[in-house]
Image: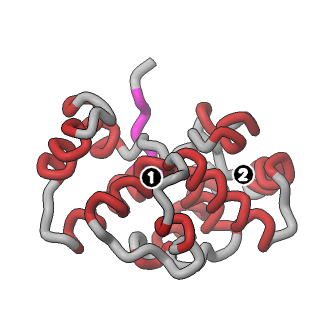
Amino acid sequence: MPHKHTDWSELAYRASEVLFARKGKNVKDVVDLLVEEKVASARGLEAKLKRGTYRFALFLELMSVLGVDAPPEWQPLFVTNDLSYATRARLVLIRELNKRNLDRSGFLARLRDAHIRVPRNDSSEEAMEDGTFTMVLMLQLAALAPVEGMERFVDMSDVLRVASQSAKGEM
């Protein structure tokens, strides 16, 4: 099924672009680096980044490969190479949910209550449990309550605007 462009995926795309701009790189430079490491095919990876449909784990990997400073609360996850990026993504999400006294099902319920449409791949708790959820889901979490450090990658006013439009059905 082809990807339907949304304002959420546009924000995810812009967040990845911020990573590249901060280090003076472009998508091709980074894609070539990740392909060398056998992460994915160049074409598929570049397409996901441009569509804004990439996983949050990839965002964390991009931060690592580019040498982007992680938000302070995420830094301990970057100290060790023993964890997969999917595990790191899961741990960031768990930490953020715990700060809000939410579990995965409570988080999805809050998004539904706010009329924020969750990407189909993220709509099961399984994606959150195994760390394969998208960057869009992290942005949606930030719409419910600030995710400390997320403002480094996307303007929170844009996140709140998209959430408001989503709730009004304007997307």
What's the residue at 43%, 33% (across, down)?
A: 4
- Contact (CB < 8 A) between labels 1 and 2? no
| Quarter of image, res 64 | bottom left
- Quarter of the rendering occupied by the N terminus: top left
Q: Amino acid at mark 2?
A: His
Determine crowd level at label 1: few under 14, some 14-19, many 20+ residues with C-alpha closer than 10 A. Answer: some
Q: Which residue is under mark 2? A: 115
Residue 141 lies in what quarter of the image?
A: bottom right
Q: Please give the name of the residue rendered at 61% of the width and 44% of the height, measured from the top-left corner.
A: 131
Q: Return the mark for residue 141.
A: none
**SS state under label 1:** helix
User: Front-most of 90 and 158?
Assistant: 90
SS class of the residue under badge 2?
loop
What sort of colour scheme is used for the picture?
secondary structure
User: In terms of depth relative to the viewer, which is nearer, 25 or 111?
Assistant: 25
Q: Position of residue 115 (x, y in %)?
A: 72, 51
Is residue 157 in view?
Answer: no
Residue 104, percent across and down? 79, 49
Name which residue type carries label 1. Asp
Magenta-span inclusion, residue 5: yes
Q: Which circle marks residue 7 in the picture?
A: 1
**Of pointers 1 and 2, the one earlier in the residue sequence:** 1
Q: Residue at x 55, y 45 (%)?
A: 86
| Residue 41 point in image, percent of width and height | 25, 28
How many other residues sit within 10 Å of disc 2, few (<14), some (14-19) or many (≥20)? Answer: some
Magenta extent: 3-9
Name the one closer to the observer, 53 or 26: 26
Residue 165: within the magenta?
no
Nearer to me, 144 or 20: 20
Residue with the most extreme top position: 1
- Residue 108 seen in the figure: yes
